[in-house]
Amino acid sequence: MPRYVILEHDHPHRHWDLMLESAGVLRTWRLAEPPRPGGAVAAEPIGDHRRAYLDYEGPVSGGRGTVVRWDAGTFEWETDSPRRVAVVLQGTRCRGRALLATAADDGWLFTMEAVG
């Protein structure tokens, strides 16, 4: 099963990086706030990251701050298209269906439905 991690990152401002393991890399979205069931969070797709971040906490090279693991676990793909990604997260904090989708203004939103 593929893995995911959410890292709290303090550079250039505090945000959370959602990273999904896919084809040898981590597809990554920057979240403006930590995920919470029933809430919508602004998201921004950013470049793929190395798989090493699945297990890493500490300083980021190039003076780009520090990352701390906020959540981690496994996930299952439901939908993967250019404007919509849906997964089921099985982590410590996040357990349920997560959706990343483009909004009317072409920005991205992250929403999560908790499971039972």
Image (spheres, helix red, strand yellow):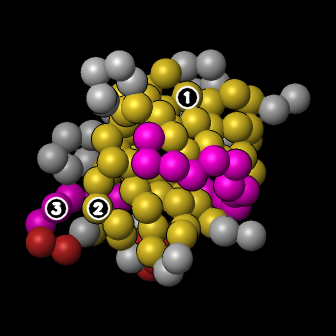
Residue 84, given in percent of the width and then of the height, sits at 51, 40
Q: Which residue is mark 2?
A: 47
User: Type of residue at label 1?
Assistant: Thr
Give the extent of the magenta segment: 63-83
Residue 99, given in percent of the width and then of the height, sits at 58, 36
Query: What whole-number distance in Å separates the C-alpha atoms at marks 3 and 1?
Result: 27 Å
Q: Residues within 10 Å of mark 2 (few under 14, many from 20)?
A: few
Query: What whole-number distance in Å separates the C-alpha atoms at marks 1 and 2?
Result: 21 Å
Q: Which residue is mark 3?
A: 64
In this view, the mark in front (3 or 1): 1
Q: Which residue is mark 1?
A: 111
Q: Main secondary structure of the magenta part?
A: strand
Query: Does residue 11 appear left or right of residue 103 in this picture?
Result: left
In this view, the mark in front (3 or 2): 2
User: Type of residue at label 3?
Assistant: Arg
Quadrant hosting residue 75? bottom right
Label 1 secondary element = strand
Quadrant hosting residue 114? top right
User: Type of residue at label 2?
Assistant: Gly
Residue occupying image coordinates x 28% and y 21%: 105
Query: Does residue 77 appear left or right of residue 33 in this picture?
Result: right
Labelled disc at residue 7: none
Residue occupying image coordinates x 43% and y 61%: 27
Label 3 secondary element = loop
Asked if 24 appears above or below 66 in the picture, the reply is below
